[in-house]
Image: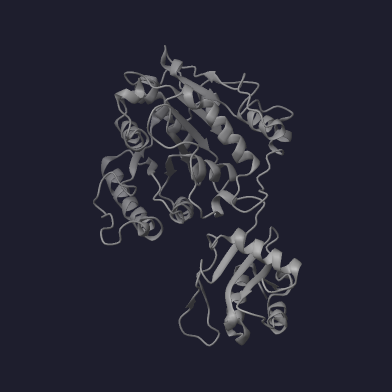
C-alpha cells in the first residue's frame, strides 16, 4: 500500500529505472494541499512519456495526478510546466527525502536535489516550518531605531516560556537607563502573558491582525496597556495582550488564514504581523514575541521569519528534545546561521542533581546542533563541546518557588532582579540582541 512518506522516493525510483528519462534534464515534483503529486519534466527534446506515466500511476495510485507536464508539450502544457519550474526556484522542500531505496538491495541512492530534482510543497498551513529560503526580519539588526525582535518558543507547553518572556522584560525595564519594551502575546489559542502583567484589554493582538487582514490598516488604539508592576517598574513595559476572550474571540481566530497564494510568499497573517511590528519600530528599544507552543503557524512565522534572535525553551524530557530537534532541523535548513539562545527550565534545586542534569543536556543538545545547525558553519573548525557563548552552551534554570503557580508579577520584581540564573538568561539574549549597539545608537 502506498503511503504519504513513500510517494516521493518511489516516484524518483521509477523515473531512474525508465530509459526515456535519460534525455530529461530536470524534474519537478509539485505536491498539493491534499498530498497528491504532479510530475513536471524538462527534456532535451521530444520524449515519449506514456509508458512512464502508466508505471507511476500504477505504483502511486490516487497519489499521482496525470498527465506528466513537459516543457516540450503543447502550448498550454508548456507554459504551465515552465511556470512550475520557475516557482520551484532550484529548491528541494524541507523534510523531503534525500535518497531512495534500491529494490535489489544495497545502499540507498542519493537524490540530486536542487539541480536535477526540484520540488514545490503546497500547504494550507505550516508553510513557515517548511520553507527553505532564508527569512528576513522586518529590518536589519543594529543601528538607530532598529530594535531587536526576540521570539520565545517552546515545543511543549508548561516549561515556563511565558514566564521567561516576562522576567526578561522586567530586567530590561529596570536597567540604567531603562529600556522601553514591547511584549506581544502571539499565543492566541491559549493567551496568558497579559494576565501576568495585569493587562486586560477589550482589544488585543488578535483584533489588530483581523482588522489588517480585512482592511489593510494597522490600528493599535486600545490594543496595549502598561504593565501593572511594583512601583514604577511597569512604566517601560507595554503589553499587547491577545485580546478579550469573549463570544466573538473564536470567530476572529477563524479569520486567520494561514494559506498563501504562491509557495514562499508571506500569507495575510504574516503581512499583518510585519505591519504591526513596523508600527512599533520607533517607540521601543526591544520587541519580545511570546510564540505559541508546538509546530504552530504563528510560532513558525515569528520564530523563523520575524525575529533577530530565537530563544528556545525546553525541558530535557524525550518529548521536549524530539520537538527541539524538529525546530533545529527547520532552522538548520536556512542559508544563514540562526542566532539562538537555548534555555533548559525546571531543573532540580539541589546542586549535585542540577549539575549532573545540566551536563547531560548540554551533551544531547550538542549532538542535535552538530546534526542540524553547525554543519553550515566552517567544517574545519566546528564548535567544541566545551565552548561557551554558543547555542549548545545551554542556559539552565532551576525550578523556582517564586515563579510557581504565578498569577501576577506584582510583588515579585525584586526577587526576579536578584536571581542569578534569570540574569544569565538575560545576558545571553542581550549579547545577540544588542550587539552592534552603542551609546550613540541609544540617544
Q: Position of residue 95 (x, y in %)?
A: 53, 61
Q: Quadrant where the N terminus lies?
A: bottom right
Quadrant hosting residue 403: top left
Percent across and percent down for residue 89 are: 56, 60
Quick one: quadrant of the C terminus? Answer: top left
Q: Quadrant of residue 31?
A: bottom right
In the image, is 23 to the left or to the right of 81?
Answer: left
Give the residue displayed 44% in from the left and 36% down from the top: 150
- Vertically, is 22 above or below 163? below
Q: Is residue 254 left or right of residue 10?
A: right
Q: Is 347 drawn above or below residue 172 in the view shown?
A: below
Q: Is residue 192 visible?
A: no
Location of residue 85 with respect to 226 vertically, above or below: below
- The image position of residue 171, as x and y in percent, is 37, 25
Front-most of 159 and 124? 124
Residue placed most toward the observer, 337 or 178: 337
Q: Does residue 406 show up?
A: yes
Residue closer to the observer: 288 or 267: 267
Dividing the picture into quadrants, the one containing residue 242 is top right
Amino acid at each position: 500500500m502506498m503511503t504519504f512518506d513513500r510517494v516521493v522516493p518511489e516516484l524518483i525510483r521509477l523515473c531512474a529505472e525508465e530509459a526515456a528519462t535519460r534525455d530529461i534534464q530536470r524534474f519537478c515534483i509539485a505536491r498539493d494541499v491534499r498530498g497528491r503529486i504532479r510530475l513536471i519534466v524538462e527534456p532535451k527534446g521530444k520524449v515519449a512519456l506514456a509508458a512512464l506515466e502508466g508505471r507511476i500511476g500504477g505504483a502511486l495510485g490516487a497519489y499521482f495526478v496525470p498527465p506528466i507536464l513537459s516543457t516540450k508539450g503543447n502550448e498550454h502544457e508548456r507554459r504551465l510546466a515552465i511556470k512550475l519550474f520557475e516557482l520551484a526556484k532550484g529548491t528541494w522542500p524541507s523534510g523531503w527525502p534525500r535518497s531512495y531505496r534500491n529494490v535489489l538491495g544495497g545502499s540507498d541512492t542519493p537524490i540530486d536535489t536542487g539541480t536535477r530534482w526540484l520540488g514545490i510543497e503546497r500547504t494550507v498551513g505550516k508553510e513557515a516550518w517548511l520553507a527553505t529560503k532564508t527569512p528576513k526580519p522586518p529590518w536589519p539588526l543594529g543601528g538607530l531605531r532598529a530594535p531587536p525582535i526576540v521570539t520565545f518558543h517552546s515545543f511543549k507547553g508548561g516549561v515556563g516560556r511565558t514566564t521567561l518572556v516576562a522576567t526578561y522584560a522586567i530586567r530590561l525595564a529596570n536597567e540604567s537607563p531603562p529600556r522601553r519594551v514591547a511584549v506581544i502575546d502571539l499565543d492566541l489559542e491559549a493567551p496568558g502573558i497579559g494576565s501576568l502583567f495585569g493587562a486586560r484589554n477589550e482589544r488585543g493582538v488578535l483584533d489588530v491582525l483581523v482588522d489588517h487582514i480585512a482592511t489593510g490598516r494597522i490600528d493599535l488604539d486600545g490594543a496595549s496597556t502598561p504593565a501593572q508592576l511594583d512601583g514604577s517598574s511597569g512604566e517601560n513595559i507595554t503589553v499587547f495582550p491577545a485580546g478579550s476572550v469573549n463570544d466573538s474571540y473564536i470567530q476572529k481566530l477563524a479569520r486567520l488564514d494561514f494559506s498563501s497564494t504562491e509557495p514562499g510568499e508571506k500569507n495575510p497573517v504574516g503581512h499583518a504581523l510585519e505591519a504591526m511590528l513596523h508600527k512599533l519600530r520607533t517607540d521601543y528599544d526591544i520587541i519580545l514575541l511570546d510564540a505559541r507552543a508546538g509546530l504552530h503557524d504563528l510560532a513558525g512565522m515569528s520564530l523563523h521569519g520575524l525575529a533577530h534572535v530565537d530563544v528556545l525553551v525546553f525541558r530535557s524530557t524525550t518529548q521536549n528534545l524530539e520537538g527541539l530537534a524538529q525546530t533545529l532541523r527547520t532552522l538548520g535548513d536556512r542559508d544563514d546561521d540562526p542566532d539562538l539562545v537555548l534555555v533548559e527550565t525546571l531543573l532540580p534545586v539541589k546542586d549535585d542533581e542540577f549539575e549532573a542534569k545540566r551536563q547531560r543536556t548540554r551533551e544531547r543538545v550538542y549532538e542535535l546542533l552538530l546534526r542540524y545547525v553547525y554543519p553550515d558553519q566552517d567544517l574545519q573548525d566546528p564548535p567544541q563541546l566545551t565552548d561557551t557563548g554558543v547555542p549548545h552552551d545551554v542556559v539552565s534554570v532551576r525550578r523556582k518557588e517564586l515563579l510557581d503557580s504565578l498569577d501576577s508579577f506584582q510583588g515579585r520584581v525584586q526577587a526576579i532582579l536578584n536571581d542569578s540564573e534569570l540574569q544569565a538568561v538575560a545576558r545571553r539574549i542581550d549579547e545577540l540582541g544588542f550587539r552592534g549597539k552603542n551609546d550613540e545608537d541609544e540617544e
